[in-house]
Image: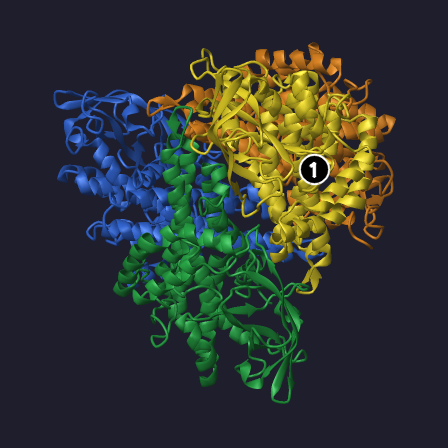
Chain colours: A green, B yellow, C orange, D blue
């Protein structure tokens, strides 16, 4: 289990750090201002994307060398960590969810036509996309609950249902949704679902409303979306009818590990800010850094981040060596641990910053909101713990 | 130590609950929509205020019978709890910070002219006010750090400084600030400061920008405000020069207990929502309420809320019987405990609601943001803990 | 809800504190030495008992004025707290479990003969007793699991079963057991059990072995005991056949509140020791008391003890005013909170003492073991939480 | 950073597991009985040692192939983990503290005579040894506090001082102490100390008393020991005068990593017991394993153990590749994390076992006591956190 990334990964990491220092961190405030001032999408992001692409820091996430950097999960992990330090970084490098998942999925399961029509522009960063899975009326952590229907009608499929937390749906450049729904509710538990491409301008698609997360209306906004008998060509189905669940599983592994490594980066950024603030801020005649309670927070942050990173690297290494399926337990572990640990560290960093820490003068509050959301996104912690416990108990159960 | 509120308090509580059920909870969504849609202040709030006033549920916080309900802290506590359940309730009953503190302060220390000109409209709810204490460049938990100057110049005072987290400054009805600054930086540690009334339209007052808290731009928005050689009549000074610190202390006790009782109410609301959701939501064939981990959260919430309420009632009772000064330790205790416990309960309630819990479809996320902010507002937890520890250690120190 | 104990309680508390300072704390080391050195019961305890009795500090727990102090639960609570500070205090004042519960039970349900033969010597402190409820092979938190049988045979009952964690069974002065068993396994869930007096020297009683708790072999040792067809007179049955469960419930309320108040006392003692040590111990040039992390521990201890005491007093007040049954939820709350909070405080006090804190040079480690055991004694936390959650959910359930 | 142990390590691990299953676990109860029954050292341990030695599972810890297995830290780590599962295992394999540290130290710094006279019998397991560092009157986490003197007098050194928590001093086979004391109190901070061999039967050595840890009087008992002008040959000094601190540092790294890996093993054993109990124990009609709160405990245990093991392996790998000095931060991290995480898991396993979990029917309580002690042994957590925080802050400090 060699957890040291390759020389190529290390070299890319160095360039990424340099790029972040030079272009990304300084653009954070401008992005915020442009976003809030105009309501339109911040032009500074297009500049960043152009720079990143010409710097060769583009599609680093993509495991296929034809379509991206062709890195293993272990090699991409340290890069995702660096990107995770800033909430505007992933999009700048064309490595942001849900596009990454959609691109991987289309690379793996798309027809040549689907790749040409939908994948290409995503890889080029000229459009963005959305993923529509969660539904308002049911607990989506149990996939059999999904109520959206995808019904064959001649050369077309008719999509009917209501989704929410559709990440990316509010982005001005969003071109299409990948929608999860049931083609055959009577089939076996894991053969009922299919996934289909729905263009954002198809008739019957209605963005009901954007949804805030802990007050934040994110640039790549989560939305509630209604699909009211939307008709799309039958060729838009990804894979065969009934493949939806399996395709979804293929998506989850890498997506989760990306999120987790970004959480590590967010935690590192928070720790850096906590240290800098503790050194700079004086109360009652001495800097906060001399107080042993703040010292404990810093020490615990260092320790927990190090544990977390190792756990994530191990999961990445396992995905590379034994595959996502066999690494399911380890992916669940990191999925539980990352947002919880990162959230706690960011919370303490906010406390060291006082009121400023909860404002947008520092990226802490927004990072906090993201980590908090990740505690239920892609399945709440409790569902993953249930799976872990079941696996552990199985080792000792005589029967069952 | 009889912690049972009086019959009058119980009667008011009953009417308050009825009013909340009938008018306040149903108005929450409208308030949100109006606020976000228009940018102007929600008309539904004016309706609520009119109703509350005519129902006799007005200025309940005010300890003087001429100017309000004339209740003791112990009697007001259960009413503040009920109001704390909804984030739009306090203003509807003219009981919201920072107006409550400003009204008490003017009642206690204001001249007849100040009362007539500034207190009366506040009591009537026709204007609102702001309190300007915290400064961006220094840790305000140490009052000697304050850099804002209030300098006598003939019949006037000249106010110069920059404040932030000026609660209420962004409210369209805000009429004036009470500003804390130094009249005599050379005086003894607690005689340097004064408090002065600054009309919102005085020349030199500049609202620099509103400030979000965990993404929320609250209706009664916190702002950064610059006072650039603002000249106000000398008669605007509250009390004598140098009284500022003492006046501030008088304000803190009741203000903190109000916040804490509202935290109890917020936690009770979260617990109710958690229970309702756990009963209604099914996953894997049974309602969440049957899961023992959710059960533990509910039980711990019940237990912790009960402890918290007793601690708050004790502090209120002590303030009534021995005074705010003598109850300082107990006020610090509840100041630390309330937002921390309420925050944890709300966090778990959010988790039970999944993504919906972080949206504004439920009041949980916004309540969370408020409780989080209270962990450093009016002095961060760590400063209050320092005071508690010092007091405890003093019992055993032979010398010092 | 007046939580101030009566003048009589306050007066007794004053005398108790004086007695503790003068006689109990100084005897702790001697008790330990005598106990460990000889294996026999420490003579210093008999001295303490004699002094306590002549000081009128005897049977303070007993609610009936004929048989004890005749105090309410609220009035006894602060006395139990003081006794809880030292692990040798309760026995010195004839207020230690399981004798207190056995005495209350015999006072309430005993026949005149039973009172004369078994209660009188207990009240006089000339003998001790044991309570045999828990069984090794089943989870006793579910009372229907109990397997011990009590079968009528002519003028006698035959007791057959195996119990463990029989508190008091190893005490050299132990005269009898009260044993819980089933007289009618076919009856309704709560009418199957009876309680019966079994003399310690009855034929067929066998002390299988003493049982340690976290390494401690307590003076009033917990034992495993076998009842191998032990025949006792039918007159030894307490109440009527089938009353066992109801009698047990009557015992639980006061017993739990005593434990909880003692936990408060143990926590206060730990806090005192923590403060004294932090003041006295220097590392790297300054006393531990100046370190902000130790300060936080002290502050949190002060805060949590205060919350805990209020919760316990409220439960006591409710038991006095509405009865044990109606106060069941509040008793469960304090049952969960007390050992958990006290345990955490003691753990931190141990940490401040370093290795010494885990030795018997300080009472901390032994107190820790007791509090840890209380997290499952009289029903594990998890069962009490289940009850709390059920009660809370019931408020919102439409049906059920 | 390849964290996979070598094939040889894996092979030894397999044999170790087999040996544990066949001989060690079944001997645990006998060891306990013999120890408590007789007061003499359990003969079953000598049997285990004989078997282990002839099975080639002997001195596995020793990094030098002449004197032990010659394994790297990374290769020894998984073996220490397996041994950590049982508290009687380390001694059986001649891998228990403080002998391991003493053997390494004598291998590294001993003269040929010292090796022959003191190291050889230790390697053969015919004697045991003790390490005397901590003193009762000062905080030993600050090494300059040490008061024991080692004074040259002709051909001898005179040792004078009082030590406690002298691990191994109570073992019947203990042959000598290695004592830390000051040869030159006037020298530089880290050149004042020396270490010297003191035979257990030297005149002036007095075992004052054994010391319990959380109630446990361990077989290899910790003692308080007085050195009353003990004269030993000058040749007993290890290294040169003033080398004591440096020699001590060399000892700490491997010692800590051994402890930590044993903590991982203890946590794994607790998790196994928790699972088995949860499957076997029924309450209210279903096994505890079906309760989601127990499930969460199991899942969190799995997750935290996995993080912990990775952290320990990384530290071991660093010690092997960059050396103990350069790995100081990472060793501190694992030193803090291991007993804290293992302790929490064992505590929960105890809770699932009810009262039985705190008795000695299961190894949980004793494991708990050991892990609790490790939170201050070799420096309390707080001192290690101070070091971690200092290192982290240094990255951002402009000056200092």
User: Foreground: B22 or C166?
Assistant: B22
Using the rendered image of the protein, determine whether residue C320 is visible from the camera's viewpoint.
yes
The x, y position of residue D345, in whole percent, is 51, 47
Mark 1 surroundings within 10 Å by alpha-carbon count, few (fewer than 14), some (14 through 19), many (20 or more): many
Q: Residue at coordinates 35% horizontally, 36% vertically from top-left?
A: D378
Give the tally of numbered discs. Answer: 1
Disc 1 target residue: B91
User: Foreground: D190 or C120?
Assistant: D190
Using the rendered image of the protein, determine whether residue D284 is visible from the camera's viewpoint.
no
Q: Residue furthest left?
A: D154
User: Foreground: B183 or D338?
Assistant: B183
Left or right for B275, reference A300: right
The quadrant in which residue C220 appears is top right
User: Foreground: C127 or C264?
Assistant: C264
Considering the image in quadrants, where does the C terminus of chain C appear?
Answer: bottom right
Q: Residue at coordinates 34% horizontally, 69% vertically from top-left?
A: A71
Considering the image in quadrants, where does the N terminus of chain C appear?
Answer: top right
Look at the picture and state if C286 lies above or below D269. Answer: above
The x, y position of residue D192, in whole percent, is 21, 25
Q: Chain of mark 1?
A: B
The quadrant in which residue B303 appears is top right
Left or right for D160, reference D273: left
Left or right for B111, reference A30: right
The quadrant in which residue D279 appears is bottom right
User: Secondary structure beneath disc 1?
Assistant: helix
The x, y position of residue C241, in whole percent, is 86, 42
The x, y position of residue A293, in whole percent, is 44, 33
């Amino acid at each position: 289990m060699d957890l040291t990334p390759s020389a190529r990964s290390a070299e890319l990491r160095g360039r990424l750090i340099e790029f972040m220092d030079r272009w990304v961190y300084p653009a954070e405030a401008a992005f915020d201002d442009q976003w809030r001032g105009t309501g339109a999408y911040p032009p500074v992001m297009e500049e960043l994307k152009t720079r990143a692409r010409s710097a060769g820091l583009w599609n680093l996430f993509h495991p296929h060398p034809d379509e991206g950097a062709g890195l293993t999960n272990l090699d991409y992990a340290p890069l995702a960590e660096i990107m995770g330090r800033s909430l505007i970084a992933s999009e700048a490098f064309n490595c942001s969810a849900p596009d990454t998942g959609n691109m991987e999925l289309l690379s793996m399961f798309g027809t040549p036509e689907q790749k040409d029509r939908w994948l290409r522009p995503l890889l080029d960063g000229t459009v963005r996309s959305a993923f529509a899975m969660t539904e308002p009326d049911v607990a989506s952590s149990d996939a059999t609950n999904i109520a959206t229907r995808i019904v064959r009608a001649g050369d077309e499929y008719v999509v009917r249902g209501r989704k929410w937390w559709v990440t990316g749906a509010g982005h001005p450049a969003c071109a299409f949704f990948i929608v999860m729904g049931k083609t055959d509710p009577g089939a076996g538990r894991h053969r009922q679902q299919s996934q289909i491409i729905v263009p954002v301008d198809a008739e019957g698609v209605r963005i009901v409303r954007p949804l805030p997360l802990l007050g934040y209306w994110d640039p790549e906004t989560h939305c509630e979306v209604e699909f009211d008998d939307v008709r799309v060509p039958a060729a838009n189905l990804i894979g065969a009818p009934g493949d939806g669940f399996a395709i979804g599983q293929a998506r989850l592994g890498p997506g989760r590990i990306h999120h987790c490594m970004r959480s590590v980066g967010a935690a590192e950024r928070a720790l850096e800010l906590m240290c800098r603030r503790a050194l700079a801020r004086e109360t009652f005649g001495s800097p906060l850094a001399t107080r042993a309670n703040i010292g404990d927070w810093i020490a615990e942050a260092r320790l927990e981040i190090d544990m977390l990173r190792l756990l994530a690297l191990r999961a990445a290494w396992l995905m590379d060596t034994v595959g996502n399926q066999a690494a399911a337990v380890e992916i669940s572990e990191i999925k539980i641990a990352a947002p919880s640990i990162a959230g706690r560290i960011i919370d303490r960093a906010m406390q060291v910053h006082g009121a400023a820490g909860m404002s947008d003068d520092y990226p802490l509050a927004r990072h906090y909101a993201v980590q908090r959301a990740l505690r239920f996104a892609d399945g709440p912690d409790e569902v993953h713990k249930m799976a872990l416990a079941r696996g552990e108990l199985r080792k000792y159960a005589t029967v069952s």
